[in-house]
């Protein structure tokens, strides 16, 4: 009985203990659950706060990096008083759009049929903000165009729309790339900009989040963005992690043409050759990029472009030589380039590549070629001309450094690279003049007495007769220096010198003023009183000569300097005299960075800074004709009504904003720019100016 009671009591005690332990365990579990929940809640709150702070930081950065812009539809300029003359042979980019092929040039946009026929040449008169286009891309059913100085242009097939960023002066667009429904825009000095439908935002790179400049190419492979630059190597971006590689990591050059990811390898094409490395996640690479070392597998300067077409990568040199890039069977250890045996010929430069569904296009300064046959291993690639500008195209180049008219009213057009074009009044090309002496043209002047045309060049003075025969005047004939900014006929007598025959000239050289007949020329420098030895402009004025230098203005009479004007002794705004023009008793002086002034008969100066600011007048790009003063600057053509003294600036009427040269006859003003020539009826200024 006692034993039974003892056992029963023990069982009761054990049961009670188990109950207590179970209750305690439940309490412990409950406490553990509560603690875990609290920790989880705290962790969730910490994570939430971190994400909120991250979102706030991203939102703040997005607001800080947002790029303000203006957007304007550009209507054609409705006038028949203006005609452009431009060369369309320099192709910068091509892109298929709406069933046709479009080509960006330094003279505007070309619309080409699938057969290569030129359907339309769009210019500034048609609505482009400028002629000098740099790149093309199709995005959201529109053709996007980069420009040299005016930001972005879009084209829907009918009208042009201009997009310009308001917070940065740099507007040169160099590359495009699509990224997850947004458009990435590379610029020369304005950074990497992302367009997301209605907003622009700058993407800053590197650990310090700095502006990426000098962008030459953009590429996207998987989740990695590649930003090639002109001089700072390659930037790579993935998951908010940036890496930069340069020649220090083995790149052949810091100027990156493009990239290619192939079979686990990253190939970087530079202007000097091709480098390769194993392609890994960027997070695995140390910040100093020591974990990414490139090997040069091909040295071939100067490379200018790459493209993948029909499953094959192609590279092209600047002169158009085409190569196939193929991975060797033993890996990237052997020479991977094979010459396809094609060359467009002499004179071709600036080559680029553009693949389409049916063809690979090779383009550059000389036209567009295409191939429609897929590449075969070991075979040559046959290309045929697609668009080649007319051989007798006028002008031969679009940078027009000088214009002038001869006694037969033929137009003489000088370029800095390719000599002279001469065109008849009806627009028919007469001849092209080019040699070692006839290039780098500065000014063109008619000797009305002899009918000869005097051309000032960097290599001396070239004199042409009516049959285009020439003779050259250099230091061996008495010039103080061959680099000549301006030349004028010296018929009769230069004050203080012996009488001259019909062959006398007066030349502004970089080492002083030269005058007289070839073989018997005299000189005048700062020793004789000129304010500077680099003579830039000359003008006969009221029986004397006004001579502009980079050190000020001089008046020469009776064979000596009688007056000088500088910023030190007068109200001249800049000592660099870049242009002179006269009308009757009025004398106008243009400066390089100090605007335009008028020298009054009293000897006082009147500066037009209130009206036009301190404009930069381009060398010898200033003339008074009939009732207007014309002034070519870095930002358009300024025109003053000589009667009312009212100024008007023309930019929309010109193929390019930089005006380099002027000439006029009784009906037209000829305006030479960096993007071709505008011929403007003088009657247009009567309506427009003032």
Image (cartoon, rainbow, N blue to C red):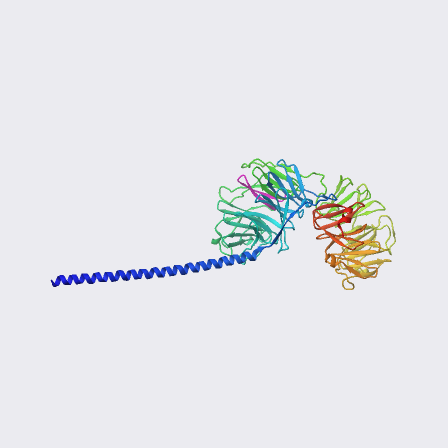
Mark count: 0
Closer to us: 474 or 94: 94
Determine if residue 442 is in view: no
Q: Quadrant of residue 434?
A: top right
Q: Position of residue 414 (x, y in %)?
A: 74, 46
Determine if residue 312 is in view: yes
| Magenta residue check for 583 | no
Magenta region, residue range: 302-319
Q: Quadrant of residue 480?
A: bottom right
Closer to us: 300 or 656: 656
Q: Position of residue 295 (x, y in %)?
A: 52, 49
Q: Is residue 404 left or right of residue 331?
A: right
Q: Is residue 495 above or below residue 118?
A: below
Magenta stretch: dominant SS?
A: strand
Q: Position of residue 359 (x, y in %)?
A: 58, 38
| Magenta residue check for 304 | yes
Name of the residue lying farthest toward the left: 1
Q: Is residue 336 left or right of residue 346?
A: left
Quadrant for the N terminus in the image: bottom left
Q: Position of residue 458 (x, y in %)?
A: 74, 50
């Amino acid at each position: 009985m006692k034993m039974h009671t003892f056992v029963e009591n023990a069982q009761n005690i054990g049961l009670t203990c188990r109950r207590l332990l179970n209750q305690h365990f439940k309490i412990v579990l409950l406490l553990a659950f509560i603690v875990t929940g609290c920790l989880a809640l705290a962790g969730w709150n910490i994570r939430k706060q971190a994400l909120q702070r991250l979102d706030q930081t991203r939102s703040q950065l997005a607001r800080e990096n947002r790029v303000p812009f203006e957007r304007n539809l550009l209507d054609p300029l409705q006038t028949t008083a203006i005609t452009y003359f431009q060369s369309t042979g320099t192709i910068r980019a091509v892109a298929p759009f709406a069933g046709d092929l479009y080509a960006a040039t330094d003279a505007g946009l070309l619309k080409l049929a699938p057969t290569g026929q030129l359907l339309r040449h769009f210019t500034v008169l048609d609505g482009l903000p400028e002629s000098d286009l740099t790149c093309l891309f199709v995005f959201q059913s529109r053709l996007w165009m980069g420009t040299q100085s005016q930001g972005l242009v879009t084209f829907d097939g009918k009208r042009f729309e201009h997009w310009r960023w308001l917070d940065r002066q740099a507007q040169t667009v160099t590359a495009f790339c699509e990224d997850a429904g947004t458009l990435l825009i590379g610029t020369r000095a304005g950074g990497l900009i992302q367009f997301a439908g209605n907003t622009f935002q700058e993407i800053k790179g590197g650990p310090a989040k700095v502006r990426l400049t000098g962008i030459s190419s953009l590429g996207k492979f998987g989740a990695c963005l590649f930003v090639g630059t002109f001089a700072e190597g390659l930037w790579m971006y993935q998951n908010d992690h940036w890496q930069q590689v340069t020649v220090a990591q083995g790149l052949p050059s810091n100027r990156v043409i493009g990239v290619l990811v192939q079979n686990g390898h990253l190939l970087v094409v530079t202007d000097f050759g091709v480098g390769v490395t194993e392609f890994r996640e960027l997070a695995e690479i140390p910040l100093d990029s020591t974990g990414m070392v490139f090997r040069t597998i091909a040295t071939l300067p100067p490379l200018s472009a790459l493209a993948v077409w029909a499953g094959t990568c192609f590279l092209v040199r600047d002169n158009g030589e085409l190569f196939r890039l193929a991975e060797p069977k033993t890996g990237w250890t052997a020479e991977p380039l094979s010459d396809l045996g094609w060359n467009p010929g002499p004179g071709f430069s600036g080559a680029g590549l553009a693949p389409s569904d049916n063809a690979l296009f090779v383009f550059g300064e000389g036209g567009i070629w295409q191939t429609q046959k897929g590449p075969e291993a070991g075979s040559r690639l046959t290309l045929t001309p697609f668009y080649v500008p007319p051989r007798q195209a006028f002008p031969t180049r679009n940078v027009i450094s000088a214009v002038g008219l001869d006694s037969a009213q033929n137009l003489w057009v000088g370029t800095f690279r390719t000599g002279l074009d001469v065109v008849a009044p009806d627009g028919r090309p007469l001849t092209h003049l080019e040699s070692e002496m006839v290039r780098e043209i500065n000014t063109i002047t008619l000797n009305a007495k002899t009918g000869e045309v005097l051309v000032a060049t960097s290599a001396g003075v070239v004199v042409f007769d009516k049959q285009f025969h020439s003779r050259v005047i250099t230091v061996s004939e008495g010039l103080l220096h061959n680099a000549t900014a301006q030349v004028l006929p010296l018929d009769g007598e230069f004050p203080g010198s012996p009488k001259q025959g019909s062959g006398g000239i007066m030349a502004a050289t970089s080492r002083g003023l030269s005058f007289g007949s070839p073989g018997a020329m005299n000189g005048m420098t700062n020793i004789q009183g000129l304010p500077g030895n680099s003579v830039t402009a000359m003008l006969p004025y009221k029986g004397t000569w006004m001579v502009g230098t980079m050190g000020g203005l001089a008046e020469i009479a009776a064979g000596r300097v009688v007056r000088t004007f500088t910023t030190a002794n007068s109200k001249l705004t800049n000592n660099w005299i870049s242009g002179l023009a006269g009308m009757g008793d009025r004398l106008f002086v243009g400066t390089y960075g100090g605007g335009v002034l008028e020298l009054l008969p009293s000897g006082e100066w009147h500066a037009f800074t209130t009206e036009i600011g301190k404009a930069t007048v381009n060398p010898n790009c200033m003339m008074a004709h009939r009732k207007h003063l014309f002034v070519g600057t870095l930002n358009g053509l300024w025109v003053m009504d000589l009667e009312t003294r009212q100024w008007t600036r023309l930019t929309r009427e010109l193929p390019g904003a930089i005006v380099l040269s002027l000439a006029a006859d009784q009906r037209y003003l000829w305006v030479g720019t960096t993007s071709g020539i505008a011929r403007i009826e003088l009657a247009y200024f009567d309506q427009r100016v003032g």
